[in-house]
Image (cartoon, helix red, strand yellow):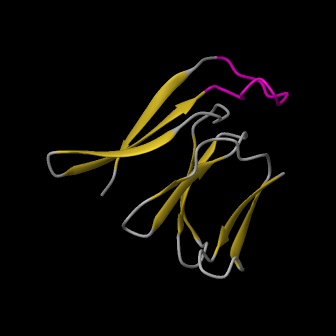
């Protein structure tokens, strides 16, 4: 399994922990809007509230996620993109293809 752990930058104290069924080796992407995007090797791409660690959104992309996760804006539309189908070569996970998934955020 894997863990996503948030620490208080001033004190070093653990603020919250989120458990995942497989390791989280993809990039963890915090946003100015208070969201944190992450993904695990089961293919679950998810968003959590940065303050509480509460999972707000989850989507299984059908492949392990071991690459980067980014957000970007085109005009007034915000997007989320992730590299999928990559286990990083260190974990015994099955992949059938590598690709990029992109979501338009509300």
Q: In this view, does 14 lie to the left or right of 73?
A: right
x%, y% of residue 77?
A: 22, 49
x%, y% of residue 72?
A: 31, 45
Report the quarter where the C terminus lies.
Answer: bottom left
Span colored in magenta? 85-96
Look at the magenta stretch and give its main secondary structure.
Answer: loop
Q: Which of 13 and 44 is in front in this view?
A: 13
Task: Count the labels in the image.
Answer: 0
Quarter location, residue 58: bottom right
Q: In this view, does 88 lie to the left or right of 82?
A: right
Q: Residue 21, relative to residue 89: is it above or below?
A: below
* Residue beneath the point at 85% across and 27% down: 92
Q: Does the magenta stretch include residue 69?
A: no
Return the residue found at the far front. 10
Q: Residue 44, relative to residue 6: is it above or below?
A: above
Q: In this view, does 6 lie to the left or right of 58?
A: right
């Amino acid at each position: 399994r894997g863990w996503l752990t948030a620490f208080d930058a001033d004190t070093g104290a653990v603020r919250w922990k989120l458990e995942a069924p497989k390791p989280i080796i993809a990039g963890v992407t915090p946003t100015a809007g208070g969201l944190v995007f992450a993904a695990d090797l089961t293919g679950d791409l998810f968003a959590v509230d940065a303050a509480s660690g509460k999972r707000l959104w989850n989507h299984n992309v059908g492949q392990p996620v071991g690459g980067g996760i980014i957000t970007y804006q085109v005009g007034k539309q915000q997007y989320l993109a992730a590299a999928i189908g990559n286990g990083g070569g260190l974990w015994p996970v099955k992949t059938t293809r590598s690709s990029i998934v992109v979501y338009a955020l509300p």
